[in-house]
């Protein structure tokens, strides 16, 4: 699963970069577009959708109780891994895109914090001189490798220790280390009250995040100057191209024996990870750096409005593939 999510993020970033080259949006939207194509909502939707499918009559995933247990486990793992990739990969794409132009105009202090709200237009993580248009004779693979080297050189890995990432690390430690697991998990565990409290907070997380999502969509209702072709490009990337690539990738993994062919629930989740709408955290990043906040709201509005249609279609098609 970690490799599958990483492939989805990298593939989305490449498609987003191609969309930027084709649509030629304003410079301050380049990082946002790449991030919207790259970062999918790997946690909330699977946690809601997959256990609900388990309860449906005639579900192909077996007994309801066992299906719900495994569905919640797989979805939680997807949420944890997705959070790590969002704050390590996508965050740095948006940050470098926002900081490049503001640094030129003296709006970034010595600690790298955005110190003044403005409507300046940030550039892509890779400058045009070094990555995007060095020469017509430079091949596409060379340009991509230059962008990757520039990204790795400028990446701020401190954000790997964001609260969500720290929580994921603690969760992995509790689940993997047997003495800690026996100490905290189970009704007879001495510290089971900690697990119960975390479970109660987790049940409230989904409604709270849904409210946050609704608040982020409010600005999108007011409209903005974002180009229609940009919105269409992101919708096509997230709901058409990525799922099609995902089918090929998961099928290839099955043929290579990297994924157990008898675990239909796991295969369904792997496929579904390629059909998710953009991550909610993308709105937080644009607000943090002050670049493309209203445009991000419009992108979120349309992608999540269409998610009910495309997720239904792709879920039906994925279920048909695995049965």
Image (spheres, rainbow, N blue to C red):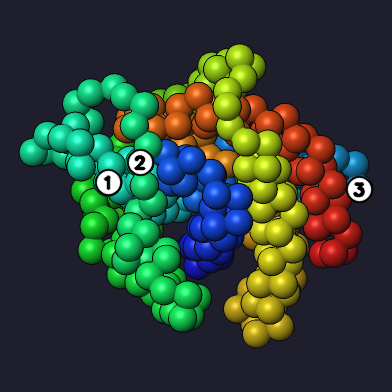
- How far apart marks 3 and 1 lie (CA) works out to 54 Å
Residue under label 1, please give it.
100
Quarter of the C terminus within the rendering = bottom right
Position of 141 compared to 93: left or right?
A: right
Residue under label 2, please give it.
122
Give the residue at x 88% y 59%: 320
Mark 3–mark 1 CB contact (< 8 Å): no
Q: Nearer the viewer, mark 3 or mark 1?
A: 1
Give the residue at x 35% y 54%: 125
Image: 212 above or below 99: above
Give the residue at x 15% y 35%: 106
Mark 1–mark 2 CB contact (< 8 Å): yes
Q: Nearer the viewer, residue 206 or 210?
A: 210
- How far apart marks 1 and 2 lie (CA) works out to 6 Å
In primary-sequence order, the first of circles 2 and 3 is: 3
In primary-sequence order, the first of circles 1 and 2 is: 1
Helix, strand, or loop for circle 1?
Answer: helix
Q: Is residue 142 visible?
A: yes
Give the residue at x 68% y 31%: 302
Position of 308 compared to 100: left or right?
A: right
- Name the spot of residue 88 as percent of width and height, x first: 34, 52
Quarter of the N terminus within the rendering = bottom right
Helix, strand, or loop for circle 3?
Answer: loop
Residue under label 3, please give it.
58
- How far apart marks 2 and 3 lie (CA) works out to 51 Å
């Amino acid at each position: 699963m970690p490799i599958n999510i990483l492939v989805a993020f990298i593939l989305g970033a490449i498609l987003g970069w191609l969309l930027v080259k084709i649509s030629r949006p304003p410079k301050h939207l380049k990082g946002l577009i790449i991030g919207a194509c790259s970062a999918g909502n790997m946690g909330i939707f699977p946690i809601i959708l997959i256990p609900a499918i388990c309860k449906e009559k005639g579900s192909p995933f077996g007994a309801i109780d066992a299906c719900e247990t495994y569905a919640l486990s797989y979805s939680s793992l997807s949420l944890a891994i997705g959070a790590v990739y969002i704050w390590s990969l996508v965050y740095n794409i948006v940050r470098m895109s926002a900081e490049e132009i503001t640094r030129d105009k003296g709006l970034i202090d010595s600690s790298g914090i955005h110190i003044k709200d403005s409507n300046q237009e940030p550039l892509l993580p890779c400058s045009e001189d070094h990555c995007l248009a060095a020469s017509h004779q430079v091949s596409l693979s060379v340009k991509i490798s230059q962008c990757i080297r520039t990204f790795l050189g400028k990446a701020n890995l401190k954000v790997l220790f964001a609260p969500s990432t720290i929580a994921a690390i603690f969760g992995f430690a509790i689940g993997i280390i047997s003495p800690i697991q026996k100490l905290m998990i189970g009704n007879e565990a001495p510290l089971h009250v900690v697990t119960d409290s975390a479970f109660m907070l987790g049940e409230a997380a989904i409604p709270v995040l849904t409210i946050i999502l609704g608040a982020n969509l409010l600005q999108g209702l007011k409209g903005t100057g974002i180009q229609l072709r940009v919105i269409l490009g992101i919708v096509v990337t997230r709901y058409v191209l990525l799922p099609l690539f995902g089918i090929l990738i998961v099928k290839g993994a099955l043929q290579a024996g990297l994924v157990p062919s008898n675990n239909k629930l796991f295969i369904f989740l792997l496929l579904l990870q390629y059909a998710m709408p953009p991550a909610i955290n993308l709105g937080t990043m644009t607000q943090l750096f002050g670049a493309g906040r209203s445009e991000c709201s419009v992108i979120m509005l349309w992608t999540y409005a269409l998610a009910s249609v495309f997720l239904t279609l792709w879920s039906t098609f994925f279920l048909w593939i695995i049965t």
